[in-house]
Amino acid sequence: MAINIDIDFQSLKTTGIKVNYLYVCERKLWLFDRGIQMESSSDKVLMGKLLGEHSYPREDKKEMLIDNLINIDIVGDDEIREVKYSNKLAHADRIQLLYYLYYLKQLGIEKHGVINYPKMRKRQEIILDIEASQEVQTALIRLHEILRLDKPPQLKKLPYCTKCAYYEFCLAG
Ligand code: SF4
C-alpha cells in the first residue's frame, strides 16, 4: 500500500534534467549542479535535440517551458510527450516524465505521458498513479540530499560511464 509523503514541493521543485540525472548517476547530478556542465558538447545530447526537432515534422508540436524548470517536448490535449535518442537510460527517462506529470498535477493539470524513441520505433506509456507520485516525492527528497553534499558522491563504475560526458573528469579525479 502506498504511503503518502508530505513534501514541500515549492522548495523541492527542480529542473527535469536534474531529476533525470538522479537516476543516471548521483555523482553526475552533483557535478552538473555545481556548474560542471559538459553535456552541451555531447554528440548524443545534440542528436537528442535534433531528433526532438525533426522526428515529428507533421505533428502540431507544442513545446512548453514551465517556471524555467521543466521543458516538455510536446504538449497535447491529454498527454505530454518526450522524444529520446536512445532507450539505454529508460529508467531515467521514465522518472523525468513522471516528474513532469507530477509538476503539472501540482498546477492542477492532469495528463498522461508518452516517451518516444524514434530511432528504435518504440514508445512507452507513463502513468502517474499513487505509487509513481510517491516515487517522484522520494526522488525529490533524495535529489536535495545529494545536492547538499560538500563533495561529489563516490565514483561508481556504471555500464554507461565510458559514454558519459564526465568520464574523463571522473577518471582524472
Ligand atoms: S563517468 Fe560514471 S561515475 Fe562519472 S559522472 Fe559519469 S556516470 Fe557518473
Image: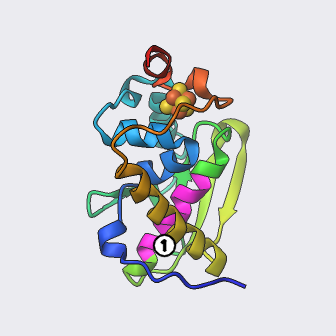
Q: What residue did someone put label 1 on?
A: 102
Is the CB–ligand 1 distance for label 1 below 8 Å? no
- Image position, residue 83 (x, y; %): 55, 47
Screen quadrant of the N terminus: bottom right
From this viewpoint, which residue is outermost toward the front? 150
Vertical relation: 160 (above or below) 105: above
Question: Relative to 9, does residue 62 appear above or below in the rendering?
Answer: above
Position of residue 55 measured from the top left corner of the image (x, y, whole percent): 55, 41
Magenta part of the chain = 93-104
Residue 169 in picture, x, y percent from top left:
43, 20
In the image, 106 versus 25, the foreground residue is 25
Looking at the rendered structure, the secondary structure element under dot 1 is helix
Give whichever of 149, 104 is nearer the camera.
149
**Given the image, on which type of amino acid does mark 1 rest?**
Tyr
Can residue 50 be spotted in the picture? Answer: yes
Q: Alpha-carbon neighbours of circle 1 within 10 Å: few (<14), some, or many (≥20)?
A: many
Q: Residue at x 53, y 53 (%)?
A: 82
Please give left or right for residue 34 compared with residue 120 in the image. left
Instruction: From the top left corner, tell me how far across and down residue 60 is, in percent.
Output: 46, 58
* Residue sitting at x 39%, y 58%: 144
Give the residue drawn at x 52%, y 62%: 139
Instruction: Relative to 25, say whether 36 is above or below.
Output: above
